[in-house]
Image (cartoon, rainbow, N blue to C red):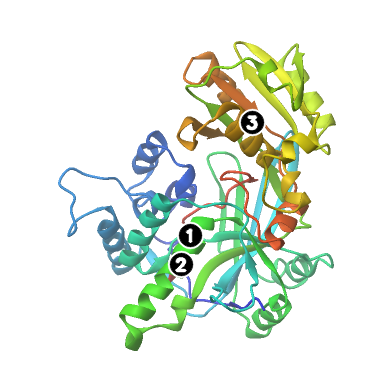
């Protein structure tokens, strides 16, 4: 059973910060060095200093970006830049955005979610592989700040629209948003604090029989379990129940604003003739990027459809010998073997081209990816259709995990609205 709890969040004081948009930032794992510097310059209290601080010459065990993050939290609390809510709450979070010319709204809520225990019934399902280095980085940060600085992003089934009903009937008409912000990308963010006990108990009761699927935040979820176990082993007497929880955003998988974008694969140090893939794929040269994207959209419900851009030419790749391809995907049920991203990695990357993870760069923006090949930064680009929500659910329930960066939920949750201090 999924167990959620309200919490006394820490957040920026509206009295101290005139333009809240200037102190927010994207999730740490999509920020590059250029954007990190821009965020540092945007505002002296920008949240980047907490989730992705700079490394400085002379940093060591006693002084480093993790220790500085902890110091900023303490200082900002002392100076009332940050304040803590007096009452525990659950926080409804609405994002309004435009995608492909259409205006969309995504609604969910933030609360604490109890971490799964090893050996007990599973209620929280990941769907992507994780890597050691990012987890070690987040673990060092969590040990210093003793807090969740950004929520993980999860989805759950709500076909009766309970979440939207609660919001439209009992939250939106009755409460003023805690934050109402339009960010520098034009995305609107609104956050409501709900601390009426009867209402928070109703939400907790509704969620208790739900399976929870991690959309974004796989590394942070695993690190939260590391941290809990670390605290159990090293300070049993001082162990807090809050170590058992992680700050989480929950949104229904039926929400009309739940958008998944594909993450394309840029490859360096590889040279091949597209016809070398013909034993498993039909290869069709396309006249333009637009023609390729259109045909991929038309074939989005088919298995094993990719785009390829190489040497100023676009190609459509369509699987022709599924049985032959399945020889290279030994593990997993049918649903796993039919995922485009699995076929791309297991069949094309691992078998045909012998591509290592170190040769791959991930890019959501197709125009940016094409330009990288044109500029000879990369040798080719593999273009994907988005993974479907139902595929994510099916794979997670089956106990399988997809390759890294198989999904890109858009828009990202903004970091800087709430902190959960243990």
Q: Which comes before the other along the chain, label 2 or label 3?
A: 2
Q: Which comes before the other along the chain, label 3 or label 1?
A: 1
Q: Residue at x 48, y 59 (%)?
A: 220
Figure check: 34 above or below 374: below
Query: Taking 112 as reference, is 2 left or right?
Result: right
Whether tag 2 and tag 3 are in contact, CB under 8 A, the answer is no
Q: Residue at x 69, y 79 (%)?
A: 208
Whether tag 1 and tag 2 are in contact, CB under 8 A, the answer is yes
Query: Taking 276 as reference, is 166 left or right?
Result: right
Name the spot of residue 185 as percent of width and height, x first.
56, 38
Residue nearest the viewer, comparing 285 with 288: 285
Name the spot of residue 90 as percent of width and height, x first.
60, 73
Residue 220 is labelled as 1
Residue nearest the viewer, comparing 294 with 52: 294
Residue 224 is labelled as 2
Q: Gap between marks 1 and 2, in whole Å?
A: 6 Å
Residue nearest the viewer, comparing 420 with 214: 214
On the image, numbered disc 3 is attached to which residue?
348
Q: Quadrant of the C terminus?
A: bottom left
Residue nearest the viewer, comparing 154 with 324: 324
Kindly state the secondary structure of the residue where label 3 is placed.
helix
Figure check: 271 above or below 410: above
* Mark in front: 3 vs 1: 3
């Amino acid at each position: 059973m999924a167990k959620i709890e309200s919490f006394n969040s820490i957040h920026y004081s509206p009295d101290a910060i005139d333009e809240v948009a200037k102190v927010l930032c994207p999730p740490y794992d999509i920020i590059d060095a250029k954007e990190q510097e821009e965020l540092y310059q945007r505002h002296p209290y920008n949240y980047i200093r907490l989730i992705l601080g700079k490394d400085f010459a002379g940093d060591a065990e006693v002084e480093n970006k993790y220790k500085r993050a902890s110091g900023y939290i303490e200082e900002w609390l002392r100076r009332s830049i940050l304040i803590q809510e007096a009452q525990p709450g659950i926080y409804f979070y609405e994002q309004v955005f435009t995608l492909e010319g259409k205006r969309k709204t995504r609604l969910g809520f933030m609360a604490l979610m109890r971490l799964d225990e090893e050996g007990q019934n599973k209620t929280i399902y990941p769907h992507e592989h994780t890597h050691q280095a990012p987890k070690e980085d987040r673990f060092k940060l969590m040990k210093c700040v003793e807090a969740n600085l950004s929520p993980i992003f999860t989805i759950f089934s709500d076909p009766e629209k309970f979440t939207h009903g609660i919001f439209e009937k009992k939250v939106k008409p009755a409460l003023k948003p805690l934050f109402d912000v339009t960010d520098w990308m034009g995305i609107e963010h609104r956050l409501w604090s709900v601390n009426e006990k009867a209402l928070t108990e109703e939400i907790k009761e509704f969620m208790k029989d739900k399976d929870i699927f991690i959309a974004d935040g796989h590394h942070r979820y695993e690190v939260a379990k590391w941290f809990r176990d670390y605290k159990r082993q090293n300070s049993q007497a001082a162990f807090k129940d809050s170590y058992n929880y992680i700050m989480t955003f929950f949104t229904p998988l039926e929400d009309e604003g739940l958008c998944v974008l594909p993450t394309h694969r840029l490859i360096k140090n590889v040279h091949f003739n597209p016809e070398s893939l013909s034993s498993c794929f039909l290869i069709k040269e396309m006249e333009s990027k637009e023609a390729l994207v259109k045909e991929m959209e038309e074939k989005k419900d088919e298995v094993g459809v990719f785009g390829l851009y190489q040497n100023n030419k676009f190609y459509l790749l369509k699987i022709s010998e599924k049985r032959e391809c399945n020889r290279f995907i030994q593990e997993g049920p049918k649903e796993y073997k039919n995922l485009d991203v699995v076929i791309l990695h297991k069949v094309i990357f691992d078998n045909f081209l012998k591509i290592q993870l170190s040769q791959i760069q991930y890019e959501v923006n197709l125009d940016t990816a094409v330009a990288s090949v044109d500029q000879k930064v990369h040798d080719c680009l593999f273009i994907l259709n988005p993974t479907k929500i139902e595929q994510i659910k099916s794979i997670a329930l089956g106990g399988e995990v997809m390759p890294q960066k198989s999904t890109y939920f858009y828009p990202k949750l903004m970091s800087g609205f709430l902190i959960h201090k243990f």
